[in-house]
Image (cartoon, helix red, strand yellow):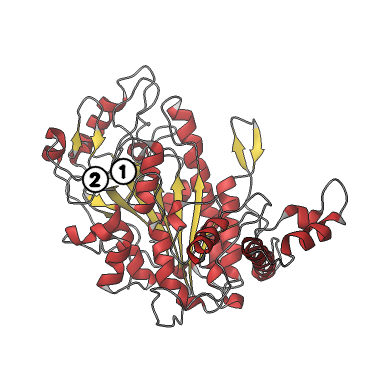
Amino acid sequence: MNESRRVFLRASTAYSALGATAGPLALNLSLIGKASAATATDYKALICLFLWGGNDSFNTLIANDPDSWAEYRRWRNQGNVPLALPAAGQPGGILPISPLTARTGRSFALHPRLVNTAALFGAGRLSFIANVGPTSHPMDPRNYATGVAPFLPPALFSHNDQQAVWQSGRPEGAAYGWGGRMGDLLMARNGGQSIFTSISTSGSSVFLSGLQALQYTTNRNVGAEISAVVNGSYGAGSTGAILKRIITRDSSHLFEKELANINRRSLTAAALLKTAALPVGTTAGSVANPTLVYSPYAGQDVENPLAIQLQTVARIIGGSASLGLKRQVFFVGIGGYDTHTAQMPDHDYNLKLVDHAMGYFDGALATLSGQDVRDRVTLFSASDFGRTFSTNGDGTDHGYGAHHFIYGGAVKGGDIYGDFPASGIGHLWDYGKGVLIPQLSVDQYGATIAKWMGITSTSEIRDVFPNLANFSTTDLGFMKP
């Protein structure tokens, strides 16, 4: 019976039939499990920005030195619809950037929509990590091409599987993600409110799934409320109180009793988070709404869903002190990156949304409750996989390695880390399509961030990133001490 009860309790955290998102079994589970005992005296937040569908990083960060630019134009102009962006200085042309670490004979630029991103890069609050992907061992392109290397992720090129691999190290069906495993180790630092260690504004994610630090999902309203309890139903507000009594009443049946306990905790947690989070507005101590963005598809200005998610994150970060929180891991996401067709207009708009959201978020953190908290917050990008260097006629197909960005005041910004492909194709295989073989692993990428978050012991980091032992470099150096 005890085992059945534990299984039920684990599964019941995902209950959504009543509109509730249940958190951990209590608000004070911070001392169980394998959590670090040290008490943090500072606050740090980590945010995973997932670009669903597989972002085309070849048109996000571009090598535009003469040799690379010639290869880029050759590969990207083979289809019916050219995918090569205009050169710098031309209308709608790429935006040159100047990395702090010069590479002889190389120069780089960003997609023309990444105006705010370029400014953050120049201000030293954003860097790029070149050629990252999930691999359990260092990858040799020659071994990959001949099928010798046994180190590829399972079901490569599959959306669902590679989303899970990026977030957890395992294919679809994975139980735990590396953000959740980090939460397990960090939640002891959050006192009695460990329920708010891992928070998603983009639905339930494997990235935040932990053993003890179960994720809390919320939205722009902040707090996973049961709408029928708060608002009533069938036009009668009084039904809310009745429903609340029904779903929280005690029972002699063990399963019903625990479900009622979970519902009570969920209601309490939602009210607690809603009270703690900063309000929306323009007055002191509030977080302003992001500006609207023109959508060529709607033909009018619209809300940017990613900016709204980051606004919610900023509001929660702003209220973290009142909850006694020291470490939080967030998950946000935006889709539309599976650009097999219509890549030029779709990718243009998608990057416009990301760039707008990043500019907004940087501004919000700079004045959060009258403080500049940008050095306490780190955001990194992730995606299913990269895309092919070549075109399929109107877009690109599923690839492997990709370039990603990392933002925050604690980032050693204004630089490009990792081995950027020489002449654009230095690490490509399958020359019919141009798929990039990652030279840096997700484990190395994540471990560098985990160290900044305070997970410093080798055993703990390798517990989160089990493949890390296979790499000689475990800290990529893009975070400040």
Instruction: Give the percent coordinates (x, y) of residue 326.
Output: 49, 75
From this view, report whether residue 336 is shown above or below residue 313.
above
Q: Amino acid at mark 1?
A: Ala
Residue at image coords 30%, 32%? 388
For the residue carrying disc 1, how many other residues have a C-alpha within 10 Å: few (<14), some (14-19), or many (20+)?
A: many
Residue at image coords 36%, 35%? 158
Do labels 1 and 2 touch, CB within 8 Å? yes
Instruction: Give the percent coordinates (x, y) of residue 202.
Output: 54, 50
State the residue position of label 2.
438
State the residue position of label 1.
402
For the residue carrying disc 2, how many other residues have a C-alpha within 10 Å: few (<14), some (14-19), or many (20+)?
A: many
Residue at image coords 56%, 54%? 14
Q: Nearer the viewer, residue 78 or 26?
A: 26
Instruction: Give the percent coordinates (x, y) of residue 56.
Output: 37, 37
Could you tell me which quadrant the C terminus lies in?
Answer: bottom left
Q: Given the current orientation, which residue lies at the most extreme front position?
A: 1
Identify the element where label 2 is drawn.
Answer: loop
Residue at image coords 36%, 69%? 452
Relative placement, left or right, of 142 versus 239 is left
Residue 160 visible within the image:
yes
Q: Nearer the viewer, residue 34 or 366?
A: 34
Relative placement, left or right, of 205 versus 84 is right
Q: Amino acid at mark 2?
A: Pro
Instruction: Give the percent coordinates (x, y) of residue 453.
Output: 39, 70
Please tell me the numbered disc located at residue 348: none
Q: Nearer the viewer, residue 180 or 344?
A: 180
Relative placement, left or right, of 262 versus 101 is right
How far apart in space, not on screen, are marks 1 and 2 (Cα)? 7 Å
